[in-house]
Image: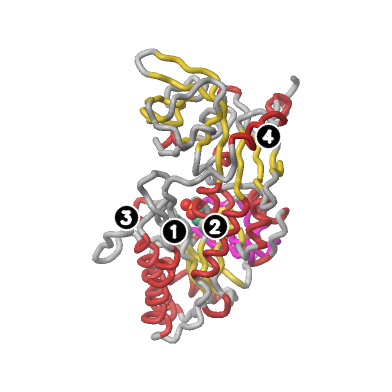
Amino acid sequence: MTQTLPFTRDFAEELAKKFPTPFYIYDEKAIRQKAREFRAAFDWVPQGGFKNFYAVKALPNPHILALLKEEGMGADCSSLPELLLAEKAGLTGEEIMFTSNDTPAAEFVKAKALGAIINLDDITHLDFLEKTAGLPGLLCMRYNPGPLKGGNAIIGKPEEAKYGFTRPQILEGYAEAKKKGVSRFGLHTMVASNELNPDYFVETAVILFELAVDILKTSRVKLEFVNLGGGIGIPYKPESSPVDLFYVSRGIREAYEKIIVKNSLDPLRIVMENGRCVTGPYGYLVSRAIHQKNIYKKYIGLDACMANLMRPGMYGAYHHISVLGKENAQSKEVYDVTGSLCENNDKFAVDRPLPEVTPGDLLVIQDSGAHGHAMGFNYNGKLRCAEFLLQESGSPQLIRRAETVEDYFATLSGF
Ligand SMILES: *Cc1c(COP(=O)(O)O)cnc(C)c1O
């Protein structure tokens, strides 16, 4: 899918007069629309029980968390600072899911104090949590389906993942937690990421629904909710299409009727923890071409680098690139689009057909609203850039300023 940009070259040039490039722009209207699509797709879930807990790691900015809260989303946190971001954004109690692993005690203590839903990653964490923060009334546990009996073509190789409880452990975990006085329970799994096959999410629901039945039979625990995790992918490439949430919802509903209703486990709430698909397509990294060099290949050098967006350099990920003012021009050139790190993988695109670029042009790197700014770093003395919310009114709101050299020096002793 290629998208029409929600702003023009004039808009970006105007902004760049006051705030030097590079910077991120997030499209408020489109983010709100996506959140509403989730609500509409899952409105059948009993007791208005559907909620997506936005995975904070995707775009850890409280302005974004606060607007998602207005649209009915919660926050999925995995560290102390992420819990604090959710708190600052006005999220409270069970609007916060704490899905961590290898968790430090202080993080459990904070999650418990906030009244967040704690999602345990391991059976030994039951004792660890009891000794450190004390056990809460509601507890979720993370299931790792491992080498599924009979195999599963859709869900890859969960046995390679470090997360979660095995099947015998999770059955024991619920029984043990119940003995210790926990009275409300959830069940979670998350085994893939950036998945575009909608059947994958239906399959995940089936696995959890069937396990919910086993948990009732074996551990005498009736679950209050299942958490299908996140991982809904986005169409980074022009030829891909987005996951149809209504198709996913219909498939999950059928499984719900067949497994949950039939086994008298109704009502069971259904929640998710998607981050990428909520904000990813609606974030744009705006950067200026500052150099062009022709050696064995043609290069366009930007004022952004891998420290602003590391996905292409780290995973060879595709991000669509537009040249502002030349959106409809033919792609007559083939360039590597680079940043300035002293690392040859600091490239936003390799062999990319683009309209002719001249230094001074603004380029927009699309689908950067998740795991973009969030993965920023300071290697090579690079500073993280500013973030703007393109408000529904059409005006930009600065939601994070750019780092300065003073910020870079702030943690050094004696300089
Ligand atoms: C990363 C992560 C998510 C969100 O994944 P997306 O790909 O952003 O949807 C949700 N839950 C857990 C436990 C995660 O680690």
Q: Examine the image and state in which quarter residue 94 appears.
A: bottom right
Quick one: SS at disc 3? Answer: loop
Name the residue beneath numbered marker 4.
15
Q: Amino acid at mark 4?
A: Leu
The residue that disc 2 covers is: 99
Q: Which of the pair 107/262 is nearer the observer?
A: 262
Queried on whether the Cβ of the residue with tag 1 lies below 8 angstroms from ligand 1, the answer reads yes
In this rendered view, identify the residue nearer to me: 42 or 261: 42
Chain-order first, disc 4 or disc 3: 4
Residue 66: percent from the left, percent from the top?
68, 56
**Residue drawn at x 27%, y 59% as measured from the top left:** 153
Q: Is residue 210 visible?
A: yes
Mark 1 or 3, nearer chain start: 3
Q: Which residue is mark 3?
A: 156
Q: Which mark is residue 276?
A: none
Residue at 57% x, 25% y: name it.
303
Q: Disc 4 on helix, strand or loop?
A: helix
- Label 3–label 2 contact, CB within 8 A: no
Crowding at dot 4, Cα within 10 Å, few <14 / some 14-19 / many 20+, comes out as some
- CA separation in Å, label 4 and label 2: 37 Å
**Residue type of the residue flagged with mark 2:** Thr
Q: What whole-number distance in Å separates the C-alpha atoms at marks 2 and 1?
A: 10 Å
Q: Is mark 2 within 8 Å of ligand 1?
A: yes
What is the span of residues highlighted in magenta in the rendered image?
95-121
